[in-house]
Image: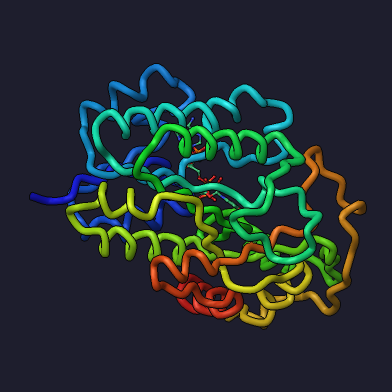
Amino acid sequence: MALQILLLGKNGQVGSELQQTLAPLGELVAWDIDELDLSQIERIEEAVWNLNPDVIVNPAAYTAVDRAEEEPHLARAVNSEAPRALAEVAQGMGAALIHFSTDYIFDGSKGMPYVEEDAPNPINVYGQTKLDGERAVQQIADAYLILRTSWVYSLRYDSFPTRVLSWAREQVVMRIVEDQVGSPTWSRMLAEFTTELLSDAGMSVFDWIRERSGVYHLAGLGEASRFEWAKAVLNFDPKKDEQIVRELKPARSEEFPNPARRPVYSALKCDRFMDVFGLNPPKWMDSLRMAMERSL
Ligand SMILES: NC(=O)c1ccc[n+]([C@@H]2O[C@H](COP(=O)([O-])OP(=O)(O)OC[C@H]3O[C@@H](n4cnc5c(N)ncnc54)[C@H](OP(=O)(O)O)[C@@H]3O)[C@@H](O)[C@H]2O)c1
């Protein structure tokens, strides 16, 4: 019998990669909002019961950090209530749940890489709703992994690296903030490591995950300011001759006000993930180099 996998958020940065990497592991059913709108909480239970998967992989989320300040109810439904409903149905049917979360559950005041035990203190609506989603999964599910990640990018989506590449073709002097620090994470790396976990779990996925249930940080290793990240993107650009930028200048966050506050520091330490699963995520810059070589 093949492993039955339900993937949600298949059209997102992480979900689209997972759709490719998970397919060889078993029978994969992949949904996005058209197949199941996660804000319609009352529809979740029946839809998932009908499918009866062995494992649910959930990178779907309301990720518009600024818009969440205006639409807290929708952000709460998708990021807090839907994970609760998924945990309930997973628990009811004996399925494992792999759920993704964010560095934005922290307030950024630590100033050194966050570990899983650090106290969360979200400073925006998105972060609060994601934290409540984590807590619901932890309270309800027996077999779950919460993979907390940071500064996710894909070169096939509107993301920080793709914006830097287009600014570099429009602006001679580019100003990039240097007072926000995180761990840039390639969406494909997340998908590959998640798939590797599930491959190790095999058909006894529920028991395997139950024995390892918990929160894990999984991100590109190390840390970078947005300024350093932008510099690396420009450096790895395979079409450098198209750039008109001549100068990269550091800027302060206050110069680019946004509706939502962001943690100034949110790098993640991934030691627990590496110890428990024996898998070593690459350094953020190595991933970026590979992403730009393979995707552009
Ligand atoms: N992006 C980051 O920098 C970042 C950083 C840390 C953690 N994370 C976390 O990592 C995970 C994956 O993020 P990502 O960057 O891949 O996000 P993404 O590209 O925004 O993808 C999220 C997916 O969820 C879908 N979705 C949104 N509302 C939905 C609804 N009501 N019903 C069903 N599906 C819905 C989206 O569909 P639409 O496109 O149609 O809205 C999209 O396909 C999320 O849990 C996120 O919180 C992301």
- The residue lying at 58 percent from left, 81 percent from top is 238
Above or below residue 99? Residue 92 is above
For this view, does 46 lie left or right of residue 284? left
Front in this rendered view, residue 109 or 126:
109
- Residue 76 at x, y = what percent? 59, 27
Residue 125 quadrant:
top right
Above or below residue 67? Residue 155 is below
Front in this rendered view, residue 252 or 200:
200
- The residue lying at 85 percent from left, 77 percent from top is 247
Residue most extreme to the top: 42
- The residue lying at 34 percent from left, 44 percent from top is 143
- The residue lying at 92 percent from left, 53 percent from top is 255
- Residue 133 at x, y = what percent? 53, 35
Q: What scheme was used to colour the molecule?
A: rainbow
Front in this rendered view, residue 108 or 74:
108
Front in this rendered view, residue 207 or 257:
207
For this view, does 186 lie left or right of residue 129? left
- Residue 9 at x, y = what percent? 42, 42
Above or below residue 57? Residue 171 is below
Q: How many marks?
A: 0
Above or below residue 149? Residue 45 is above
- Residue 210 at x, y = what percent? 33, 48
Residue 71 quadrant:
top right
Residue most extreme to the left: 1
